[in-house]
Amino acid sequence: MPGDITFVDNEHLFSEFSQLYRVLYLSELNEPLVLKDTNGRIFVENENELNDAELYNLKHWKNVY
């Protein structure tokens, strides 16, 4: 099934990458995505740092599946 991803918390990887990136925890990754479409623009109501290109991709893939 598309989008059926199992996330895990890995403390070793967290400690290695958290100095360079914001590493998301399992609870954050499993949070349902709340999208709002206003006049053709997609807004993510969850806390996020997505740019316009990433939001465009969300809109595209949301329509595909």
Image (cartoon, rainbow, N blue to C red):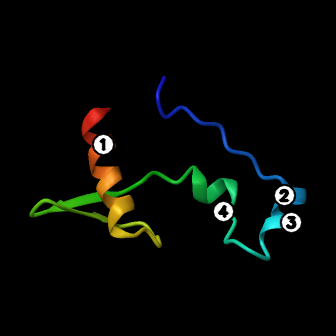
Q: Residue furthest top?
A: 1
Dot 3 and dot 2 residues touching (CB under 8 Å): yes
- x, y (%) of residue 6? 65, 37
Q: Find the distance from the CA under tag 2 to the CA under tag 4.
A: 11 Å
Question: Of circles 1 and 3, which is in front?
Answer: 3
Mark with earlier residue (1, 2): 2
Residue 22: name its quadrant: bottom right
Mark with earlier residue (2, 4): 2
Mark with earlier residue (4, 3): 3
- x, y (%) of residue 20? 74, 74
Q: Residue at x 83, y 53 (%)?
A: 10
Residue 8: mark: none
Q: Find the distance from the CA under tag 3 to the CA under tag 2.
A: 5 Å
Q: Which residue is mark 4?
A: 24
Q: Which residue is mark 3?
A: 16
> As shown in the figure, which amino acid type bears the numbered disc 3?
Glu
SS class, disc 2: helix
Q: Find the distance from the CA under tag 1 to the CA under tag 2.
A: 30 Å
> As shown in the figure, which amino acid type bears the numbered disc 4?
Leu
Question: Of circles 2 and 4, which is in front?
Answer: 2
SS class, disc 1: helix
Q: Which residue is mark 2?
A: 13
Residue 34: name its quadrant: bottom left
Residue 62: mark: 1
